[in-house]
Amino acid sequence: MRTPTVPALAFLADGGETGALMRGHDWSQSALGQPDSWPQSLRSVVGLLLHSKFPMFVAWGPELGFLYNDSYAEILGAKHPAAMGSRFHDIWAEIWDDIRPIIEQAMQGNATYHQNLPLTMNRKGYDEQTWFTFSYSPLRDESGQVAGMFCAVMETTEQVLAERHRAKEHERLRHLFQQAPGIIAVLREPDHIFEIANDAYLQLVGHRHILGKPVREALPEVAGQGFFELLDRVYSTGEPYIGHEISVKLQRRPDGPLEERFVNFVYQPTVDYQGNVTGIFVEGSDVTEAVKAHQALQESEQRLRQLANTIPQLAWMADAEGAIHWYNDRFYEYTGMAFEQMKDWGWQTVVDPTALSDVVRVWKEAIATGKAMQMTFPIRGADGRHRHFFTSVAPLRDAAGNIVQWFGTNTDITPIENAQNELKAANRRKDEFLAMLAHELRNPLAPIATAAELLKLAVLDEDRVRKTSDVIARQVGHMTELVDDLLDVSRVTRGLVTLQEETVSVNSLLAEAVEQVHALLETKRHRFTVQPSDDQFFVKGDRTRLIQVFSNLLNNAAKYTAPEGHITLRVDADARYIEVAVEDDGIGISPTLLPHIFDLFTQAERSPDRSQGGLGLGLALVKSLVELQRGEVSARSKGPGKGSTFTVRLPRVEERGSNSGQRSARSDLPRSTNKTRVLIVDDNEDAAEMLSLLLESQGHEVWVCHHASDALSRAKQSSPTILFLDIGLPDMDGYELARRLRLLPETARSLLVAVTGYGQPQDKERALQAGFDHHLVKPVKLGDVLGLLTKIDH
């Protein structure tokens, strides 16, 4: 290897970093050869570029060896310093296809200039988009032949990107200007020539061609409306002008009529650097819809006032801050106040003081939030009394959504509240009725339970057994009727009960009624007095229902009279009426309760010493049943703690051979003389066993089955004459069993009797359709059973 001499590298002196690099470079492998072999022309150019601050490079020789200065080293990036002396193609291989045509032109002796040429370069380990402005010039050797090329270059990547950014920003601003919701225009020179107008402005004037035209030519129909004169004044004085809701008439369609629009606008003069007015900037908004909406609102308000004077509610209007400026006539009529007394916030004087603070607070919250307000509070009337009003207030808004008014109404809901209170009271009475239902149903059970205990005693003679049985029969009958009433209480209270009228003795009715409540009287050790009449009085009515009436009154007196209190049953009569009065010295009736004492579910207040609150059904039934039988009932009391008197008044009738009141339960029972084959089917073993014992005691042959399948087998074996079938059987209901029995030859003509707890007409109809001959409701009365057996005898 030959080392260059110092004189050969003298032209590289003070060449900066790249000059030092050239001096120390190993040129033995370079495309340029040794520096001492370089021609003088190349040395001169290299010496020039090394001392320049402008990025430059030289490519020399057949392989275009690369020489460059410090400024160009920055463009090379990571390719420096390996690029020194390397081939042009190897250094810039990634852009070679882009620059080769330019290089070829230079090598052919043609200089070229290129501005902001885009190149994708890899000089930092990754591809990047760059832009360069440069010139390629041919370099000649001593013989005048092109032996290389010279390049002066400047990277313009940042400038290009900045210019693109400015262009985008300008486009964005232009787009925003055009899309601005307000009208914008720029006028220049004293003639007010349109230089710029955005879409909103063009839409206002009708999308006509106005750019480049003076305003008087572009908008001729505006002449005489004062706008041209305003523009002249602003241009001459330099003082801006602001207009609010100004009317302008424009011909927005060719050959169309003038349309009135309303605008808010500013005429702002523009000035040059010397302060001279050069034009006018116009900015504003088309507020036509808002103005029309406000006009419509004013018209609507007038109509609203007229309408508000026709409604029954109290009505008023307030401004956006809540100050009331109008009341309808109903408000003045109800309050007896004048407008001057109640304007703004003066209405507070008629609001119940106990509710005023809450009303003011809620009203102020509505004003602050813009939300509708609803609440109920008392308002004083002209008579000085307060009535409850439901107040509803709603905001009235303009097209922009701003609150311009408040409209409120006050509806008198006092009748509704009274009705609601009545409903609540009725509901409370209903709840107490349900709570005491079980207790009330047990009242008839007291004599039954006592009678049952007596029957267990073996020492009873036949007469006592008969009397005891009579008590049980009567109480069961009464209890059955009571259950029927409970299941269809509306039917009873509406007077839809079918009465079985007969002439009955009042004394016998009262005797049975006393019997039903005797246990309760004994338990509470009441001093019970009966003041019957010496004569026998008769009435015409339903025996069972009349007993129910008197027992309810006696039971009511017993429940509401303290232990050892006094109860009197008194009978009086005149020529036309019988009066039965039940008096007690119990808790009495308050004046507020007395008018409602016969309403359904009405009860007196319970006290610690009186646990029996009653159903609240008894007195309602008493009233309905008495009135059904052409009578009347009334109640009197001097107040709480002073006792009560209930009086039933019934039309009097003469006895016509009736002795129904003297018959015993046993004498009423029909008797069967023939022995009958009977099959009882019931899954309630006790009920089936008792009915079986009863029929066997009458001399009948009885079989008992608890399942439908057993009943079918027994029916085939025994061919019973009459069958009592429970409907609710476990394996097959009574309806299906009846249909199957009708298909058996042994029971095809037998008497089938349905025994069920369902007693509605539709239940009876269903039983008959299934093949039953009769329908009995549990608990079955002995008389009904024996009556059916008697029919078989005949």
Image (spheres, helix red, strand yellow):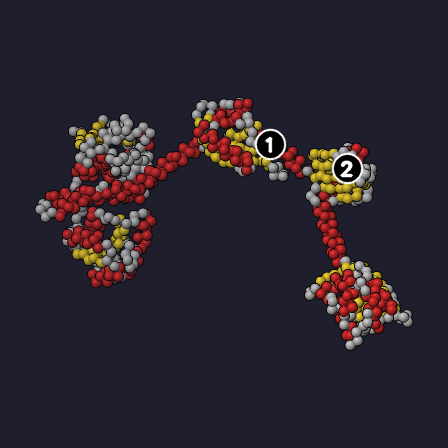
Task: Name the side, left or right, on which 722 lies relative to 319.
Answer: left
Q: Amino acid at mark 1?
A: Glu
Residue under the image location 62 percent in, 32 percent down: 298
The disc labelled 2 sits on which kind of residue? Pro
Q: Residue at x 17, y 48 (%)?
A: 671
Query: Can residue 624 be seen at all in this image of the molecule?
Result: no
**Residue lying at 75% horizontally and 37% vertically, measured from the top left:** 268
Work out whether residue 783 or residue 219 is closer to the camera in this orientation and state it: 219
The x and y percentages for residue 307 are 56, 31
- Where's residue 648, x and y in %? 26, 31
The secondary structure type at the circle numbered 2 is strand
Describe residue 677's horizontal placement relative to residue 206 as left or right: left
Residue 749 lies, with reference to residue 388, above or below; the image says below
Q: Secondary structure at mark 1?
A: helix
Q: Which residue extends farthest front? A: 6
- Residue under pointer 2: 269
Describe residue 708's horizontal placement relative to residue 268 as left or right.
left
The quadrant the N terminus occupies is bottom right
Give the residue pinned by disc 1.
Answer: 301
Q: Are marks 1 and 2 in contact (CB under 8 Å)?
A: no
Q: Quadrant of residue 627?
A: top left
Residue most extreme to the bottom: 1
Name, please, the residue furthest toward the right.
143
Classify 10 Å Cα crowding around label 2: few (below 14), some (14-19), many (20 and above). Answer: many
Question: How many marks overall?
Answer: 2
